[in-house]
Image: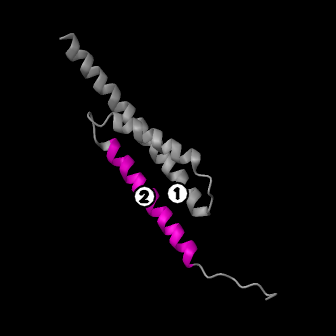
Amino acid sequence: MTQLVSAHQLSETLGYIGTVGAALAVVGALVACIAVAVGNIELGVPITVWLVGMLLAVAAAFVDLRPTVVVVTTGAALVVATVIRLAWERNRPRRMRADR
């Protein structure tokens, strides 16, 4: 009986940890998307925050899959934002200098 109670308490705790991890991942992905949108190439900290959040959410995946789904969705949004920014930058008309 004691092991069952311990397992139940552990699963509750991991559920909360997964939710906190998903929240961290959302914040990291939002900051990274904003950085990509303004053209900043310093993405080390936001991507690291997203990765840590992802690891916490995946660690609690056997209890609740919702945090993991949120993390995967934010990761996909981050990839889409980066691809859109790169495509926009590549197709942007370039100005010719007047001295030529």
Instruction: Examine the rendered structure and indicate whether residue 46 appears above or below residue 33.
Output: above
Q: Determine if the magenta segment contains residue 85.
A: yes
The amino acid sitting under disc 1 is Cys
Whole-percent x, y for residue 43 in the image? 58, 51
Whole-percent x, y for residue 44 in the image? 58, 47
Residue in front for this viewpoint, 70 or 36: 36
C-alpha span from label 2 to label 1: 8 Å
Task: Return the disc, 2 or 1, that comes first in the chain's sequence.
Answer: 1
Question: Element at badge 2?
Answer: helix
Q: Which residue is drawn at 48% across and 66% down?
A: 83
Whole-percent x, y for residue 50 in the image? 48, 45
Q: Residues within 10 Å of mark 2 (few under 14, many from 20)?
A: some
The image quadrant that residue 36 belongs to is bottom right
Q: Do the residues labelled 2 and 1 touch (CB within 8 Å)?
A: yes
Q: Residues within 10 Å of mark 1 (few under 14, many from 20)?
A: many
| Residue 41 appears in the picture as rendered | yes
Q: Name the residue under label 2.
A: 77
Instruction: Examine the rendered structure and indicate whether residue 55 appears above or below residue 85.
Output: above
**Direction from residue 27 to residue 8 in the image, left or right:** left
Query: How many numbered discs sit on the rendered protein?
Result: 2
Q: Name the quarter where the C terminus is drawn.
A: bottom right
Q: Name the quarter where the N terminus is drawn.
A: top left
Q: Name the residue under label 1.
A: 33
The amino acid sitting under disc 2 is Ala
Which residues, given as a range, are shown in magenta? 67-91
Instruction: Examine the rendered structure and indicate whether residue 57 appears above or below residue 42.
Output: above
Q: Determine if the magenta segment contains residue 61.
A: no
Q: Residue at x 51, y 42 (%)?
A: 49
Residue that lies at the very extreme toward the left in this rendered image = 1
